[in-house]
Image: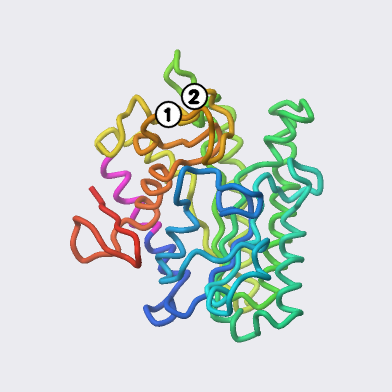
Amino acid sequence: METKGKLFALLLLFSLVAVSTGHGEKQNARLFVIGDSFVDTGNMGNRTSDGLMLTDYIASFLHRRTPVIYEQRKKASKSELEDGMNFARGGSGVLDVSFNNYSMALQVGNFKEQIAQNVYTKVDLENSIALVSYTGNDYLYKTTRQKGTMKDVFDQTKPIVDLLTKNLREIRGLGVKKIAIFGTPPRGCFPGKYSETLRKCDKTWNKASRQHNKLLKESLKILNKERHGSKFVYLDLYNAIDSALFDKIREIVGFANRFKACCLDAHMCGPIAQKKCKNPELSIFWDAGHLSQNGANIVYTYLVPSLSPTPLGYYFGTYSYIFI
């Protein structure tokens, strides 16, 4: 498992370096974020975490502050806007009807609005990176609110990936030259789907996630062959979380805590929850569907494992990461 984790981490490092091809470029790159609650730092009111999220860590990697959220754009200073903007909203999918009915297409529309208002120029966009998160809200909505079956989830996969690909083309059409997108996570290992009794993940949900990711990677290959001057990079969130959960060698978190939500009732709770664990720093999941700060940090170390010439750690921006 240790060898698998190191090899995977190295591949992900190369993926992220492909997004940003030079130290100077990283310093100038604005970060634009589109997607769901995995990257929403406040548009829906709360962060679904007890602290930092993957958005914060990736912004730090780019030598940027966390981008201002779209809802606070009118209060943001010129300096804050130079870091980019976060359009993501918790509960979003690519379908018009989902948990919040605020699809990725509407977020792209908000992005277009900022360009039309000259908040961002063509040059700004050419020197920017878009981070896109689609972690499967449409599938979850189908099985919970619409009482669908797993067969419905599998039947939905190709249409959803096709629509997601359409959104990625829209983002490229705005002039963004580097676009990174998360694959869907291993939902079958999340709290509520992981079987404490059997000590195993829900294989069907994980199979559905892998099927989505397979089709997404095929679409990204096509997009990268279309030669429109933009580079699409797949960020393997599935294997990053899988590695965090099953690498028993790491002692950052007790293994017994890895499949349990910090919220005692295992539901979404937000940062001011009445019911929460005493030590969220020992949890990977904050609630049933999201990473804690500790979980995001661990997953991030699998995404970008070695930003330092030394194996012990690296100081980046205002955050300190220790790699063990």
As for residue 76 lying within the magenta part, the answer is no
Q: Give the residue type that dot 2 points to.
A: Leu
Q: Tell me the SS state at disc 2.
A: loop
10 magenta-colored:
yes
Residue 227 in picture, x, y percent from top left: 62, 76
In the rendered image of this protein, does residue 292 appear above or below residue 276?
below
Q: Going 58% across and 66% down the picture, which residue do you hit?
A: 68
Where is residue 251? Give x, y as percent: 25, 36
From the viewer's perspective, tell me whether residue 29 is left or right of residue 3. right
Q: Label 1 is placed on what type of residue?
A: Cys
The N terminus appears in which quarter of the rendering? top left
The residue at which mark 1 appears reads as 277
How packed mark 1 is, by other alpha carbons closer than 10 Å (few <14, some 14-19, many 20 or more), is some
* Residues in magenta, as a range: 1-12
Q: Are marks 2 and 1 in contact (CB under 8 Å)?
A: yes
* Left or right, residue 201 beside residue 134: left
